[in-house]
Image (cartoon, rainbow, N blue to C red):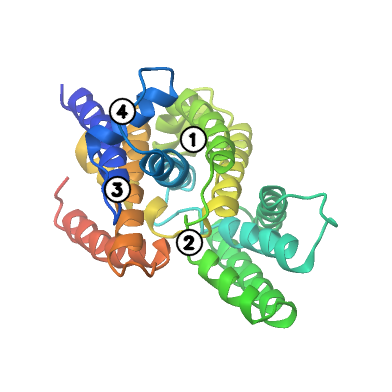
């Protein structure tokens, strides 16, 4: 019953966290008001709130909270997948340079005007993530393949695309653009809208289905390459599909929310502590914990120094580093 209870508790925590996050802020809005507004917009009876309160909940805070939850869900899922495929518990979307490549693609569209208006920020981020992913895989293949070369190639790709992003911003953006881009690169959900929610939900939904379907194969991969092949798992096809899905999710999230670190690194470890290592349990619990974590990280980012916001990536790093240190100490002592 422990895995079932863990999944149910984390899903309940996601809903409660979103509702509480929307209610928190300078405007006088309560959780029952939030529920009433959402029900009214979904076809229920009218909510007994003012138009201003209705707009605050439906147009401002609800899209932002949902985007935070979806982003946390997707980043945690990406981290869990990459840690399993690479058999390295330090892997996350940043390891393969996917986040850095997505940032470069998005900045190229926003600052340089690549595509002459025909490319959206999400498209630019996805192209950048794809280019980074292909480059890293080519470097790793040329070095003989394996986990070690992949990680080393990922580090090189991360540094390359981070440098390109900095060069574009510093050489082509004015002072206002530079400030906005740098704030966005650290993670910001301030401009979240329903279109961002829809795009991210679609990408993460596709990724979640593909990853959950591949959960038995991931269990086989964790036992070793030879064992996986003996069980009929095509490692090449599995890696291409799941890493491609990971690139899609990461690029979409980076385009909407910026490059947010430590979620994909820390959350899968917390999920394994709760429900063990079987992927049909680890993946959904990781997604739920990631959603809760991101919702509260964004709530802290917009409320601690209100009315001034801090980038949500700063909050995830400040919370994620101590949490990861605790997890490492627990693992070293053999605590599961």
Residue 273's image quarter?
Answer: top left
Q: CA distance from mark 3 to mark 1?
A: 25 Å
Are circles 1 and 2 on residues that touch, CB within 8 Å?
A: no
At 59% from the left and 55% from the top, the residue drawn is: 98
Circle 4 sits in a helix, a strand or a loop, which is it? Answer: helix
Quarter in which the N terminus is drawn: top left
Residue 149's image quarter?
Answer: bottom right
Name the residue that disc number 2 marks.
187
Q: Residues within 10 Å of mark 1 (few under 14, many from 20)?
A: few
Are circles 2 and 3 on residues that touch, CB within 8 Å?
A: no
Are circles 3 and 4 on residues that touch, CB within 8 Å?
A: no
Q: CA distance from mark 2 to mark 3?
A: 22 Å
Of the two numbered discs 4 and 1 on the same chain, state the one appearing first in sequence: 4
Front disc: 3 or 1: 3
Of the two numbered discs 1 and 2 on the same chain, state the one appearing first in sequence: 2
Residue 171, position in %: x, y?
73, 82
Name the residue that disc number 4 marks.
36
Name the residue that disc number 3 marks.
269
Q: CA distance from mark 4 to mark 2?
A: 30 Å
- Asked whether 302 or 236 is in front, the reply is 302
Q: CA distance from mark 1 to mark 2?
A: 40 Å
Residue 154, position in %: x, y?
58, 61
């Amino acid at each position: 019953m422990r895995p079932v209870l863990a999944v149910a508790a984390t899903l309940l925590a996601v809903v409660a966290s979103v509702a509480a996050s929307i209610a928190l802020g300078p405007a006088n809005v309560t959780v029952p008001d939030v529920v009433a507004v959402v029900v009214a917009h979904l076809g229920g009876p009218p909510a007994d709130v003012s138009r201003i309160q209705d707009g605050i909940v439906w147009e401002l805070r609800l899209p932002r909270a949902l985007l935070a939850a979806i982003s946390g869900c997707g980043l945690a899922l990406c981290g869990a997948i990459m840690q399993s495929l690479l058999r390295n518990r330090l892997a996350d979307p940043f390891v393969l340079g996917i986040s850095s490549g997505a940032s470069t693609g998005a900045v190229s569209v926003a600052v340089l005007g690549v595509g002459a208006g025909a490319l959206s920020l999400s498209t630019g981020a996805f192209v950048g993530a794809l280019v980074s992913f292909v480059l890293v895989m080519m470097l790793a293949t040329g070095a003989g393949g394996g986990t070690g070369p992949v990680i080393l190639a990922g580090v090189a790709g991360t540094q390359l695309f981070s440098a390109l992003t900095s060069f574009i911003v510093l050489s082509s953006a004015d002072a206002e653009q530079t400030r906005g881009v740098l704030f966005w690169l650290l993670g910001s959900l301030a401009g979240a809208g329903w279109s961002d929610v829809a795009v991210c939900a679609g990408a993460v939904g596709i990724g979640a289905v593909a990853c959950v379907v591949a959960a038995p194969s991931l269990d086989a991969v964790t036992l070793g390459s030879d064992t996986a092949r003996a069980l009929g798992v095509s490692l090449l096809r599995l890696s291409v599909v799941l890493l491609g899905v990971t690139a899609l999710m990461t690029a979409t999230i980076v385009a909407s929310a910026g490059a947010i670190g430590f979620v994909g690194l820390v959350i899968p470890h917390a999920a394994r502590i709760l429900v063990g290592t079987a992927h049909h349990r680890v993946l959904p619990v990781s997604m739920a914990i990631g959603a809760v974590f991101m919702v509260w990280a964004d709530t802290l980012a917009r409320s601690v120094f209100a009315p001034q916001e801090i980038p949500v990536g700063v909050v995830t790093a400040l919370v994620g580093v101590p949490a990861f240190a605790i997890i490492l100490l627990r693992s070293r002592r053999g605590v599961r």
